[in-house]
Amino acid sequence: MLLAIVMNIFLSAYNTPRDTVPFDRIKVEDYKPALLQGIKDEDKEIEDIVNNPEAPNFQNTIVAFENTGELLNRTSSVFYNLLSAETCDEMDKLAEELSPIMTDHSNNIMLNKPLFDRIKAVYDEYKAKQFEGLNTEERRLLEDTYKDFVSSGANLNEKDKARLRAITEELDVLSLKFEENHRKDLNKFTLHITKEEDVKGLPQSSLESGRQEAKDRGLDGWVFTLQSPSYGPFMQWAENRELRKQMYMAYNTLCTHKNKFNNIEICRKLVNLRLEYAQLLGYKTYADYVLEDRMAENTKNVYKLLYDLIDAYKPVAQKELKELNDGKDVEPWDFSYLSNKLQQKKYNLDSEKLRPYFELSKVKEGVFGLATRLYGITFKRNKDIPVYHEDVEAYEVYDEDGSFLAVFYCDFFPRKSKKSGAWMTEFRDQWIDDEGVNHRPHVSIVTNFTKPTAEKPSLLTLGEVETFLHEFGHSLHGIFANTKYESLSGTNVYWDFVEMPSQFMENYSVEKEFLNTFARHYQTGEMMPDSLIESIVAARNFNVAYACMRQVSFGLLDMAYYTLTEPMKGDLMEFEKEAWKDALLLPQLKETCMTVQFSHIMAGGYSAGYYSYKWAEVLDADAFGKFKEDGIFNRETARSFRNNILSKGNTEHPMTLYKRFRGKEPSIDALLKRNGIR
C-alpha cells in the first residue's frame, strides 16, 4: 500500500514543463487513492480552522478556507475533465463509485456548523462596519463565501440538512448517468450506405469522411454517425430525403427508447430533486434559488428578455421559414437542406466552397494572430508538455512583455471517448499566493471538428470557425485572469456573464479584415476571394431570426422545468412540447425529445440558466459595437476590455465591470441592429 501511494503521480511533484499534468504517466488506479487522500487532507485543514483558538478574522478563517483542498482540487480537475474528453468504461464506473464520496465530503464542509459559525462571525463583523478595512476583492470573497454556505444549507436544521445531503448525492449520480447514457446512445448509431445513389448531393468532404469511417470499421461504402461533423453536413446536403429523416429521427429520439440508455425518468428526478432542494432553502422554485446570484436577478426579468425577443424576432422568423419552401410546410429533416439551397441561391454562398480556405492549422494561425493583434500575446507549441491523447496540442502563452501567461491545450476532433459538443475548461486556475507569486492557469478547449482524412487535412466549416472563436473567447477569459483568490479567478463569474467574452469573439468570424489575415486555400495558398467574403458578410443575418427563436425555445424549456412549484408527475415529452411552443416554428413530432439529451440544463450547470446565451448576446453585441466604433483591432479598446473585464474574474459585480469598459449599461438595440431586425 505504501509503495502504491509513493508511486501515485498525484502525490508527488509533477516535474513537468510549467508543472503541467503528467497525462502520460497517469493510471486510472491513481485517481481514487489521490482523491481519498485529498479528502483526508482537506478535512484536517478544515479541522485546523475550526479549532483555531484565535477569534475568527478574515485571514485565519476566510482566506484559510479559500486555501484548503489543494490536492483534492488538483486531482479532481484532471479526473472530471478527462471524464468528458477521454473516458473509458473503467473511468465511468469509478465516477459512479466516487460521486457519493465526493458529494458527502462537500456536504461535510458546507454543512459544518462550527466552520459556518466562524465565517458568519467574520461576515457579520464586517457588514456592521460597511465592510471597512477590506478592498474590493476581499469583500467579494467574504460575501461569496458566506452566501455559498447559506445557499448550501448551512442555516438549516439537522433534519433538513440530512435531506439536503441525500438530494445532492442523488443529483450527482443522476447527472453522471445522464451524460454516460447520452454519449453511449449517440455512439451506438451508424448509418451504413453502400449505394452511390444514396449519397447523392453530399460534398466530397463528407464522402471522404464517411468512407474513412467505414474503412475504420472494416466496412465498404460509407458510414455516417450522429457526431456533429458527420451529422451536420449530411442533413445539409444529402438529397435522399428518407435518409435525412432517418438520421434526424435517430438524433432526436436519443435516450428515449426502452433500453438502458433511456433518460426520461432521470430527467424527471433531476427536475424534482432540484425543486425540493430549492424549497428546503426557502425558495418557491429552483429558478428563484438560482437567479438570486445572476445579472438577471429574477424570473420576471428572464421571461421579459425571452418574450421581448419573441416579439421582435418571431414575425421575421416566420417570413424566413415561408421563403425557405415557397410557403409550403417544412419538415424538421428538411430545414438544413432547404436552408443550404436558399443560401446558395440568395448569396451564392456554398459552405463547401469555404472549407478549403478554413484549413485548421491556418484557422489556428488566424485565431492566435487575432489575439496577438488585439492583446500582444503569442502562442508557442511545446511538444514536451504531456497530453492525454495524440490529437491534443499544448502551447505556452506569452504576454506582450515576454512574460509567461498560461498553458493552452487544444483538443479538436471527435472520438468515442469524448462527449459531443464544444467547451472550455481548466486544469489549473490562476491565483496569487501570499509571497506574491502569480500561479498562471492551464486552459483547455475541447471541440468535435471535422477530422482530417487520408486525402485532406481538417477543413472546417464557417460554423466550426465560429465555435473555435467562441471557445477561444472563454480561454482568453481564463488566460488573462489576474486575481488574488482562485475562487474568483477567470471564468468563475455569474453564468449569465460567462458567455459574453466567448460570444464577443464570434463577431470576428464575419469581419473581412480578420478573414483576410488567414483564409487561404489549403492547396494553392490563394487568399479567399473578395466575392466569397462579401457573401459571408451579406449572409451573416441569413435565418438569424429562426436561429434566435431556436435559442429562445431552449430558454423557455429550461425555465418551464425550473419554475415548477410542484413536482413533475406527467408525461415529460408532452411537457416539453407545451413548454416551448411559443417560440417554435417547425412541427413537433410525438416521438422526439430534446430534454433527454439537453446536457446544459440537466447535467451541465445551466439549469435555470440557459437564457444566459441570449442575455450575454445583448452584452456582446453592445461591447463589439465599441470595437466597431474604434476599429475592430484597436489596441487601446482591447486593452480596456482585457483590464476591465477579462482579467477581473468575479472580483466585482459584472455590470460594474461592463459599465467601466463601455461607459454605459447595455441595451438590446445593438443586437437588433446587428441582426438587421431594427
Image (spheres, helix red, strand yellow):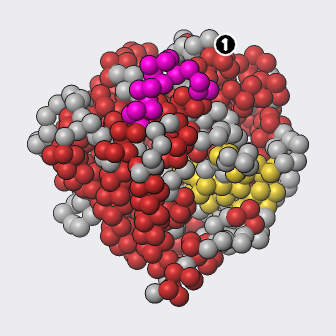
Residue 123 among those drawn in magenta: yes
In the image, 426 versus 68, the foreground residue is: 68
Q: Residue furthest front?
A: 53
Residue at image position (50%, 40%) is: 62
In the rendering, at what x and y percent does residue 512 appear? 77, 32
Q: Is residue 227 above or below residue 317?
A: below
Residue drawn at point x = 86 percent, y = 53 percent: 525
| Amino acid type at mark 1 | Gly
- Magenta range is 119-135
Q: Is residue 580 left or right of residue 87?
A: left
Could you say where residue 442 lies in the image, as x and y percent from the top left? 66, 55
Vertically, is 506 above or below 254?
A: above
Specify whether residue 287 is in view.
yes
Residue 544 is situated, as x and y percent measured from the top left of the image, at 52, 28
Which quadrant, please, contains the C terminus? top right
Residue sitting at x 39%, y 62%: 183
Q: Height in image: 266 above or below 480?
A: below
Which residue is disc 1 drawn over?
A: 663
Point out the residue furthest to the left here: 569
On the picture, is 474 further left or further right than 121? Answer: right
As drawn, is 263 to the left or to the right of 357?
Answer: left
Examine the structure image and report whether residue 339 is included in the region drawn in magenta: no
Dot 1 falls on a residue whose secondary structure is loop
Confirm whether residue 460 shows in the render. no
Q: Quadrant of residue 532?
A: top right
In this rendered view, identify the residue nearer to me: 633 or 172. Answer: 172
Q: Is residue 283 above or below residue 19?
A: above
Residue in the foreground of this view, choosing between 93 and 449? 93
Q: Quadrant of residue 478?
A: top right
Q: Position of residue 181 (x, y in %)?
A: 32, 62
Q: Is residue 648 left or right of residue 583?
A: right
Mark 1 neighbour density, 10 Å: few (under 14) some (14–19) many (20 or more): few
